Image (spheres, rainbow, N blue to C red):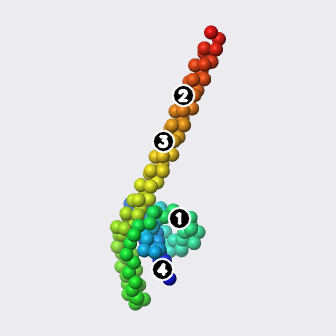
């Protein structure tokens, strides 16, 4: 049976608080980045997860190594506390976010190029029509 795991890291990225959702499924890591603004309280984060998790736009999947280990609950608590003190996110997560940004950038470029070509075509047609109207009376 395949294992699916998720992780949320909230950190301060000047001037806003940012949350990074990591989703690992079948050895593939996908990441979504959310900007919270002011420092979110625990209940606000919980509410956000419940309301918006399924509408998050995750990055394309990146291959990653998943370690299977049984861990002591107290050690997990200590690690969670230690992670709360650390800043930054994992490099794989950063790569996945960068891929998502690049993908969005390419889509935006394609849309703007199509819009520009459509505007140019419309202006050309308008000029041709005006030209025909000017020569109609002669």
Comes first in the chain, label 3 or label 2: 3
Taking the image as shown, residue 83 lies to the left or right of residue 34, namely left
Mark 1, residue position: 56
Mark 3, residue position: 113
Mark 2, residue position: 124
Marks 3 and 4 sit apart, C-alpha to C-alpha, by: 42 Å
Asked if disc 4 and disc 2 are in contact, CB closer than 8 Å, the reply is: no
Marks 4 and 1 sit apart, C-alpha to C-alpha, by: 20 Å
Comes first in the chain, label 1 or label 2: 1
Comes first in the chain, label 4 or label 2: 4
Mark 4, residue position: 3
Q: Residues within 10 Å of mark 3 (few under 14, many from 20)?
A: few
* Label 1 SS: loop
Comes first in the chain, label 3 or label 4: 4
Image-quadrant location for residue 75: bottom left
Question: Going 46% across and 46% down the picture, which residue do you hit?
Answer: 109
């Amino acid at each position: 049976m395949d294992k699916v795991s998720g992780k949320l890291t909230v950190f301060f990225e000047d001037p806003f608080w940012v949350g990074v959702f990591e989703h690992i499924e079948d050895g593939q890591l996908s990441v979504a980045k959310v900007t919270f603004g002011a420092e979110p309280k625990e209940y606000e984060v919980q509410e956000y997860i419940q309301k918006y998790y399924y509408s998050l736009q995750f990055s394309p999947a990146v291959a990653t190594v998943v370690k299977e280990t049984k861990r002591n609950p107290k050690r997990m608590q200590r690690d969670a506390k230690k992670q709360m003190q650390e800043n930054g996110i994992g490099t794989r997560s950063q790569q996945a976010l960068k891929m998502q940004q690049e993908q969005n950038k390419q889509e935006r470029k394609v849309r703007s190029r199509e819009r520009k070509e459509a505007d140019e075509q419309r202006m050309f047609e308008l000029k041709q029509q005006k030209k025909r109207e000017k020569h109609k009376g002669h």
